[in-house]
Amino acid sequence: MAKLAETEGTSFVQWFRAAAPYIHAFRGKTFVLAFGGDAMLREDFVDLVYDINLLNALGVRLVLVHGVRPQVEERLVQEAQYVQGRRVTDSEALEHVKDAVGSVRVDIESLLSVGLPNTPMAGAEIRVASGNYVTAQPAGVLDGVDLQFTGEVRKIAVAPIRDRLAAGEIVLLSPLGYSPTGEVFNLTLEEVATQAAIALEADKLVFILDHGDTIDSKGRRINRLTAAQVPKLLRELPEGDMKLYLPHAALACKKGVGKVHLIGADVDGAVLMELFTHAGVGTMITRQSVENLRPASIEDVGGIVSVIEPLETEGILVRRSRERLEQEVEQFFVDELDGRIVGCVALYPFPETGAAEMACLAVAREFRRGGRGDALLAAVEEAALEQGLTQLFVLTTRTTHWFIERGFILGQPEDLPAPRKELYNWQRRSKVLIKTLTA
Ligand SMILES: CC(C)(COP(=O)(O)OP(=O)(O)OC[C@H]1O[C@@H](n2cnc3c(N)ncnc32)[C@H](O)[C@@H]1OP(=O)(O)O)[C@@H](O)C(=O)NCCC(=O)NCCS
């Protein structure tokens, strides 16, 4: 029993420590979290509310966007008419939408107000702000059919939302928008969430799927995607929320939202696992196109030098002569964007020990925070695994947390393969970080 408690305690402590870099990184960041009307009908919706509470407590600026599809459908007497996948909202349907939005909004506000002892909400005093933050316009006529009160987002009231977030409140947006002519329009939650994330320059946009999971047509989990890969995947995906949300995710990335996450609703704590562990449980979409990430050739040496030279001058990377780079260029991968090298990384295998060193990971300053570092790491991990290597190590003086967040653990110079240990620079005192790779 004591042993079990000890193991549980150890894994808790390890997990909590591993989450620390995220806790720091997320404070003050803006996340838009969108979930459909089905989520609220689930018994475990309260778990999502607990996770929202936790993110709020950690200082994340949260905008929630809820859906109401099942709640509206339940109220409709007549079956709705659809044109190109868009529902026609007549004046009667609009009344049901307003009714459903009102009731769902109150339910969410009430759940976020719980502060009962013996629940994760104990002591929480969450304030929720909602209102006319979304301006809408009519979607118009499609294929000769007037969509009536079906609308499109025209504007998001960025400054008032930011004020509420800065005051520590959670902002709750509904799939409704108001027009300067005094009309109300029915919107889709995915459009509201995407436009809000773009307008607020959100760091993350998170969609929780109501139906289906983040898997491809062969049932394989899709962990990472770039906006450029989305159109091809869309052609292969079956109908479902993944297919519905992906175009919005790609648009958000292209318009500057840092990262978009799609998460299946079936795993308890899925939001926390996706956001606080490097491996995640859903799909993360970033802007950069991987087509540009490729093994380097001799023509790339100039580009690599332009990326690493400023970092060598700052002492972040160890200086390499141009000659050495020319000799070793085949060990490098480069990230090329519009013909310019914007990132690089090198892989030096030590096959006799089953390990490889990752070195010279760098992204040009103006291109950082777009998931490029992650993509370069993924390329190196894949190449190492292809060579049958199962351990990746890196020596760094300033970027320890970045690696720890990505599954590396702190080691010692003694852990290095013998030939590398001999070259270890004791004056530089780099930290040794090690990651065990799994296919
Ligand atoms: C480390 C590096 C390659 C990351 O590149 P990137 O393209 O910005 O990486 P990503 O977009 O995938 O990740 C960015 C995240 O890493 C975080 N990050 C950047 N530098 C970090 C550091 N030194 N410690 C901890 N986190 C760091 C950013 O805050 C950002 O977090 P967020 O997404 O929560 O906002 C880039 O910062 C770099 O070139 N650094 C200098 C060179 C270096 O230190 N190399 C490693 C030694 S080999």
Image (spheres, rainbow, N blue to C red):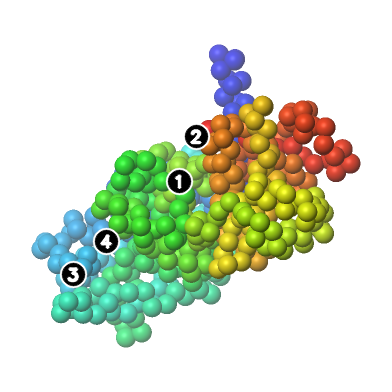
Q: Earlier in the sequence, mark 1 or mark 2?
A: 1
Determine whether label 3 and label 2 are within 8 Å by CB.
no
Q: Secondary structure at mark 2?
A: loop
Report, in whole angstroms, how far the alpha carbon at label 1 lies from the one at label 3.
33 Å
Report, in whole angstroms, how far the alpha carbon at label 3 lies from the one at label 2.
44 Å
Out of 272 and 2, give the one closest to the viewer: 272
Q: Earlier in the sequence, mark 3 or mark 4?
A: 3
Q: Which residue is mark 1?
A: 223
Indicate the amino acid at tag 4: Ala
Indicate the amino acid at tag 1: Asn
Q: Secondary structure at mark 1?
A: loop
Q: Earlier in the sequence, mark 2 or mark 4?
A: 4
Q: Residues within 10 Å of mark 1 (few under 14, many from 20)?
A: some
**Residue 430: x percent and y percent?**
80, 41
Determine whether label 1 and label 4 are within 8 Å by CB.
no
Q: Residues within 10 Å of mark 3 (few under 14, many from 20)?
A: some
In the displayed structure image, the side of residue 186 where residue 404 appears, left or right: right
Determine whether label 2 and label 4 are within 8 Å by CB.
no
Report, in whole angstroms, how far the alpha carbon at label 2 lies from the one at label 4.
46 Å
Q: Which mark is residue 83?
A: 3
Residue 133 appears in view = yes
Residue 85 vertical position relative to residue 1 in the rendered view, above or below: below
Q: Which residue is mark 4?
A: 100
Q: Earlier in the sequence, mark 1 or mark 4?
A: 4
Report, in whole angstroms, how far the alpha carbon at label 1 lies from the one at label 4.
34 Å
